[in-house]
Amino acid sequence: MWKMSIKKLVLSGLMAALVLVGTMLIQVPTPMKGYIHIGDSMVYLSGILLGPIGGSLAAAVGSMLADLFLGYGVYAPATFVIKGLDALIVGFIYHKMLNEQGSLARKLVTFTVSVVFGGAIMVGGYLVYETMLYGFAAAVPNVLANVTQAVGGGILAAPLLLSLDKIKVFQNLYDHN
């Protein structure tokens, strides 16, 4: 059973806000009426720092709200599901592959593997959604933009994760029950 302490609930709200701000801070328009942003770095950190369930909810809510606030309401329902799954997969893989005593190299490899799978969920999810909206031929050009966003999010999140891990900011937040 999944349990959430008051501390974890507050940090989940904080991570949702960081996803929202990271997504809204910088937007680079893409061919399919979407945008590239740095919010994926916070999506990945949400899944890892809060665990798959809490991180998934924080990422889904923060990302969906950013779409609504920025006028991309047509993407909001898909974003809720896609970013939620993204954080869920990243958090699940990271915690299954790594114990807390992992070396720096192991943490980076584990992080990279989890981001590759989470990023693939994001890229594939938006390809399917945009294909439903605009057709496959029109949706394909956004694949490169989404891959860029996934890779960029991973590059930005890695040093943040290592720094937070080093100072044990989120120690014992993820419970395995």
Image: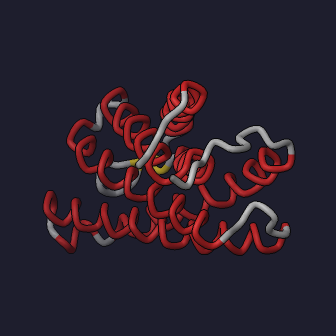
Q: Which residue: 79% across, 49% down?
A: 165
Above or below residue 5? Residue 150 is below
Above or below residue 94? Residue 74 is above
Q: Which residue: 30% across, 31% down?
A: 68
- Number of numbered tags placed on the structure image: 0
Could you say where residue 95 lies in the image, as x and y percent from the top left? Answer: 60, 63
Residue 21 can be seen in this image: no
Above or below residue 90? Residue 168 is above
Could you say where residue 69 lies in the image, as x and y percent from the top left? Answer: 35, 26
Could you say where residue 135 lies in the image, as x and y percent from the top left? Answer: 15, 67
Q: Which image quadrant for residue 99?
A: bottom right
| 137 lies left or right of 158 | left
| 163 lies left or right of 146 | right
Could you say where residue 62 lies in the image, as x and y percent from the top left? Answer: 43, 35
Q: Which residue: 34% across, 55% down?
A: 82
43 and 96: which one is in front? 96
Above or below residue 116? Residue 132 is above
